Amino acid sequence: MSDFATTPGSAHQQIDTSVPHSARIWNYWLGGKDNYPVDERAGDAYTDVFPGIVTIARSSRAFLRRNITHLVAECGIRQFLDVGTGLPTADNTHEVAQRIAPRARIVYVDNDPMVLAHARALLTSTPEGATAYMDADVLDTDRVVAAASETLDLERPTALILSNVLGHIPDHDVARSVVTRLMDALPSGSYLSVNDGSRGVDPVFERAQDAYNESGAAPYVLRTVDEIASFFDGLELVDPGVVSVPLWRPDTLSPAPEAIAEHGGLARKP
């Protein structure tokens, strides 16, 4: 089962290929093909200043894969609300979840016309499960919840995924409010997965990101580790808590993973 929904007129939004785009640049760093020369040039300019951004992008994706695997295999979660989905790439949420539990149901939410153009790739569900895509803004939490309820049973535990999306909300109080409102719509036993770029860890990364934000591109705000941890207030953190993403339940300890300026965690709603 799959479903595809858009806000009125969103299908007619134009994709500007003359200026670099954050989702396409991220896709480029992940090794994807859904990008243009302008994005490659911007991505290369960024890596010239901070080559570690490629490691951050790929470590973020690996963290999400381990989160989802833990949620399905160890916590019994069968429903996912992935907000700020980004462009489809390897190991999308439904692919990871449905490999373990074919009946898993996933709703993706984004409001980027580039993501919308590729959203069909997010709808390759197993016959037993379901995937849906909704074109909506993360700030419009009422619409997000209403859209999710068309595919998910929000009286059952659900995992909310906010992967590298809260940095696009500059005001920290507003970002926390978004998380609170979305989690308030989910029942006890639900989970929150958050990861974002962190400040106070790598000054080279901070300089590169500050320069990118000043370029006129849509800004992405790096937050301190304490600020990222505050998104989990009132929830029960899963060990090892909020840590640099390679250190969150790594697949192997040999060689030991190194900390990077990307932090995240997973927590349960009591």
Image: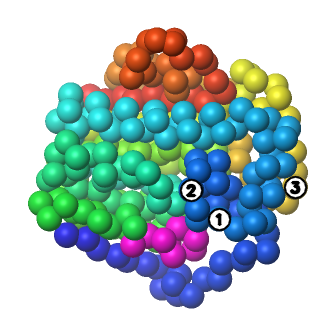
Is 261 magenta? The answer is: no
- Tell which tag, 1 or 3, sits nearer the viewer: 1
Of callouts 1 and 3, the N-terminal one = 1
**Label number found at residue 215:** 3
Residue 117 seen by the camera: yes
Counting from the top left corner in percent of width and height, residue 31 is at 59, 50
Q: Determine whether 252 is above or below 169 in the image.
A: above
- Identify the residue shown where x is 32% and y is 67%: 123
- Kindly identify which residue carries mark 2: 32
The structure residue drawn at horizontal position 61% and vertical position 30%, both measured from the top left corner, is 262
Sooner in the amino-acid sequence: mark 2 or mark 3: 2
Residue contact at pointers 1 and 3, CB within 8 angstroms: no
Residue at 14% across, 53% down:
103
Picture quarter with the N terminus: bottom left
At label 1, which amino acid type do we have?
Asn
Viewer-proximal residue among 186 and 121:
121
Residue shown at 48%/71% (left/top)?
Answer: 118
137 sits left or right of 215 in the view: left
Q: Are dots 1 and 2 in contact, CB under 8 Å? A: yes
* Quadrant of the frame with the C terminus: top left
User: Circle 3 sits in a helix, a strand or a loop, which is it?
Assistant: loop
Q: Nearer the viewer, residue 94 or 267?
A: 94
- Give amino acid for label 3: Ser
The range drawn in magenta is 111-120
**What is the distance, in whole Å, between disc 2 and disc 3 at their CAs?**
24 Å
The dot on residue 196 is none
Which sits in the foreground, 254 or 71?
A: 254
**Would residue 252 appear left or right of 126 to someone viewing this image?**
right
Q: Is residue 163 left or right of residue 23?
A: left
Q: Which residue is mark 1?
A: 35
